[in-house]
Image (cartoon, grey):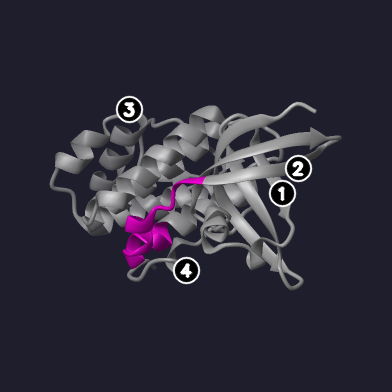
Amino acid sequence: MKLFDCRGIIINKRDFGEADRYITIFTENFGKISVLLKGIRKSKTREQSSADILTLSKFTFYKKGENFILTNILTLDAYREIKENIENLYISLYFLSILNSILVENNRKKTLFSITEKTLNFLKDNNDMKKNYILIIFYLYTLVKEEGLNFSLGNGEFFSFEGNGFFQEEKRYSYKVNKIEKEIIEKVVNKRIKDIINGEYPLKDIKNVTLLFERYLNFHLGTEFKLKNYLMGVE
């Protein structure tokens, strides 16, 4: 029996029975996996916290057929700083809900795992709302690329979800952006996030760009992600 060690972030959990729990883990080396924990809710508090959502843990398991059988779990980071900040907690849960929806079982996404870990580490210390929304834009655009989607900047002020880019004339399933919003999008695509952070961009425009990327993902993935269900002040 060969044992494997890997780090992973718990992105979903489902309790059932008197003491059992299914957890869904976004692992560094195996992608998304699901594990049954028998009796975990009757175990020590420390062991329960290792198996809670929004926790980075070290897992030891072996494979039996297509199933992962867990033998040990150890907390590496419980993200307590995030859990004590209600806004950052809801942003993190928003990210985890997206991951739980779009990740495919046993499909390794090592780059996305690294970015997710860095994103959560940023949220541990950040209390700036503007930076939070810029972070959301960055993360959503990362997901766009990870899902193999792409769009062109081009000319025009109409962003077409169906046409994957900007056009001078309004098309079906399009969104009209203003000059500031388009500038923000261009900086995101050209990897100039720091320019957005250091710039004097209105929060309203940053929020609108956030929703544009969300709608783009929803359009192409058939999902229904809604940031407004997690954060106040989002239309």
Q: On the rendered structure, is 25 left or right of 167?
A: right
The residue identified by callout 2 is: 69
- Tags 1 and 2 in contact by the CB under 8 Å rule? yes
Q: Alpha-carbon distance for marks 1 and 3?
A: 39 Å
Query: Is residue 53 a member of the stretch shown in magenta?
Result: no
The residue identified by callout 4 is: 229
The residue identified by callout 3 is: 190
Residue in front for this viewpoint, 73 or 68: 73
Q: Looking at the image, is mark 3 or mark 2 earlier in the sequence? A: 2
- Mark 3 against mark 2, which lies toward the viewer? 2
- Mark 3 packing: few (<14 Cα in 10 Å), some, or many (20+)? few
Q: Inspect the image, locate mark 2, and give the three-letter code of the amino acid beneath it.
A: Ile
Q: Inspect the image, locate mark 3, and give the three-letter code of the amino acid beneath it.
A: Asn
- Mark 1 against mark 4, which lies toward the viewer? 1
The residues colored magenta run 75-91
Q: Position of residue 20 (x, y in %)?
A: 72, 64
Q: Judging from the image, what secondary structure is the residue with disc 1 in?
A: strand
The residue identified by callout 1 is: 35
Query: Is residue 78 a member of the stretch shown in magenta?
Result: yes
Q: Looking at the image, is mark 1 or mark 3 earlier in the sequence? A: 1
Q: Inspect the image, locate mark 4, and give the three-letter code of the amino acid beneath it.
A: Asn
Looking at the image, residue 45 lies above or below residue 213? below
Q: Which mark is residue 218?
A: none
- Tags 3 and 2 in contact by the CB under 8 Å rule? no
Q: Inspect the image, locate mark 1, and give the three-letter code of the amino acid beneath it.
A: Val
Residue in front for this viewpoint, 32 or 60: 60
Q: Alpha-carbon distance for marks 1 and 4?
A: 28 Å
Res. 156 image quadrant? top left
Q: Residue at x 66, y 54 (%)?
A: 23
Q: Looking at the image, is mark 3 or mark 4 earlier in the sequence? A: 3
Residue in front for this viewpoint, 125 or 193: 125
